Amino acid sequence: MDNLITVVTDSSCDLPAEVMERHGVDVVPLLVHFGDQTFRDGELPSEAFWAKASGPDQPRTSQPPSGSSKSTSSAWWLAEGRPFA
């Protein structure tokens, strides 16, 4: 039986991967900005991230836009017939 509750978190969550997988936690990546460039958290390899961070534009983060993943889209929840809040 599917879980009646789905936990959704952003990529700054510190839960171990095996815990998130076992409990079906859905992770939505934060956005990382360097000047006018925007990347999803985890999209840049570590070396590229630190190369950009040592440049003139320091990294900034922001929340993902509403509806940017299935878990943040009320339309997905309605289509699945699942309650949401």
Image: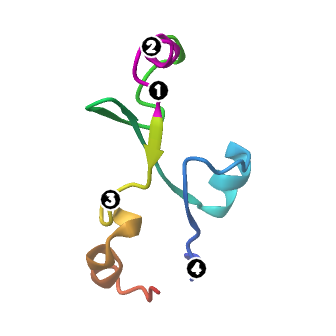
Check the image and report above or below for 5 versus 42.
below
Indicate the colouring scheme: rainbow
Give the extent of the magenta segment: 48-59
Q: Which mark is residue 70?
A: none
Q: Nearer the viewer, mark 2 or mark 4?
A: 2
Q: Nearer the viewer, mark 4 or mark 3?
A: 3
Q: Earlier in the sequence, mark 3 or mark 2?
A: 2
3D distance between C-alphas at marks 4 and 3: 22 Å
Crowd band around label 2 with a 10 angstrom C-alpha radius: few (<14), some (14–19), many (20+): few
3D distance between C-alphas at marks 3 and 2: 24 Å
Disc 1 secondary structure class = loop
* Kind of residue indicated by mark 4: Ile
Circle 4 residue = 5
Check the image and report above or below for 10 versus 51.
below
Check the image and report above or below for 73 versus 56.
below
Q: Name which quarter of the figure residue 77 lies in.
A: bottom left
Q: Earlier in the sequence, mark 2 or mark 1?
A: 2
* Kind of residue indicated by mark 3: Pro
Q: Earlier in the sequence, mark 3 or mark 1?
A: 1
Res. 30 visible in picture? no
Disc 4 secondary structure class = loop
Crowd band around label 4 with a 10 angstrom C-alpha radius: few (<14), some (14–19), many (20+): few
Q: Which mark is residue 48?
A: 2
Circle 1 residue = 58
**Residue at figure coordinates x 34%, y 79% from the top left:** 80
Q: Earlier in the sequence, mark 2 or mark 4?
A: 4
Check the image and report above or below for 17 versus 6.
above
3D distance between C-alphas at marks 2 and 4: 37 Å
With 2 as the anchor, is 71 left or right in this view?
A: left
Q: Which mark is residue 65?
A: 3
